[in-house]
Amino acid sequence: DSGVTQTPKHLITATGQRVTLRCSPRSGDLSVYWYQQSLDQGLQFLIQYYNGEERAKGNILERFSAQQFPDLHSELNLSSLELGDSALYFCASSEGTTNEKLFFGSGTQLSVL
Amino acid sequence: GESVGLHLPTLSVQEGDNSIINCAYSNSASDYFIWYKQESGKGPQFIIDIRSNMDKRQGQRVTVLLNKTVKHLSLQIAATQPGDSAVYFCAERHNQGGKLIFGQGTELSVKP
């Protein structure tokens, strides 16, 4: 167990809908990262937050947004969902900001029908 | 046996043999590298990491080798066990604070 908690484990929704994925980092970790994993793209970095502030952005679509709350949990919001958004979404956390030793959660499997 | 990463090839080894998983990274300025193991239905699990000022680092049954001259990283697993069956990812960090870039992974299959 990595100590990173993600909910829900599975999510099935329809095109055009909006969903929220939730992540609780390991105790003491201030950075939260979101990654998307699909069969054809591998693990793609979406966004990083550190202590409530956006730290770095990767290949995140404008339809997607995230935030980190004062208690350090994070949410990833996916809107106007398309079939191609179906993927595994992982949250990871680390102590600092330097992208070292990320610990990953079990992921949320999103299926857009 | 050995295999080249980044294209999700499959490496099949016999239980008890040593495994070598290879990874060619892209950026000569990368200063930090890390290996993850991902079992089916689970998130990536940290195995071992290494900084660019080192060329070898050992953990429990695992060794990571870094060859900066040819931009090559390898993960050696000693006495491979069925529980080692998983997809292994290497990742590089382009500089301190830069994001981790993951390779496509190598699937390791251990035959009992």
Image: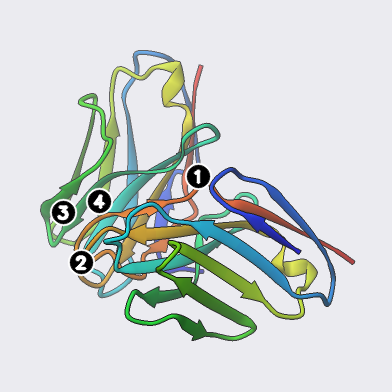
Distance from Cα at disc 4 to Cα at disc 1: 15 Å
Which callout, 2 or 4, points to the residue nearer the camera?
2
Q: Which residue is mark 4?
A: A74
The residue singled out by tag 3 in the image is A69
Q: Are marks 4 and 3 in contact (CB under 8 Å)?
A: yes
Q: Residue at x 28, y 36 (%)?
A: A59
Describe residue B60's horizontal placement relative to residue B112 as left or right: left
Nearer the observer: mark 2 or 3; the answer is 2
Chain bearing mark 3: A
Q: Amino acid at mark 4?
A: Ser
Within 10 Å of disc 1 (Cα), the crowding (few <14, some 14-19, many 20+) is: some
Decide which of tag 3 and tag 1 comes sooner along the chain.
Answer: 1
Tell me how far mark 2 sits from mark 3, CA to CA: 25 Å
Question: Few, some or many C-alpha atoms within 10 Å of disc 2 (few <14, some 14-19, many ≥20)?
Answer: some
**Which residue is found at the position 26% from the left and 61% from the top?**
B29
* Residue ID at (22%, 51%): A48
- Write down the residue under mark 2: B96
Does dot 4 land on a helix, a strand or a loop?
Answer: strand
Residue B19 picture location, percent across and down: 71, 70
Outermost residue to the top: A16
Please identify, in this view, whether the residue under mark 2 or under mark 1 is nearer the observer.
2
> How far is disc 3 from disc 1 in space, using C-alphas?
21 Å
Circles 4 and 1 in contact, beta carbons < 8 Å: no
Mark before the other along the chain sequence, 4 or 3: 3
**C-alpha span from label 4 to label 3:** 6 Å
The verdict on a common chain for dots 3 and 1 is: yes
Under circle 2, the secondary element is loop
* Residue type pointed to by label 2: Gln
Given the image, what chain letter belongs to the residue carrying mark 1? A
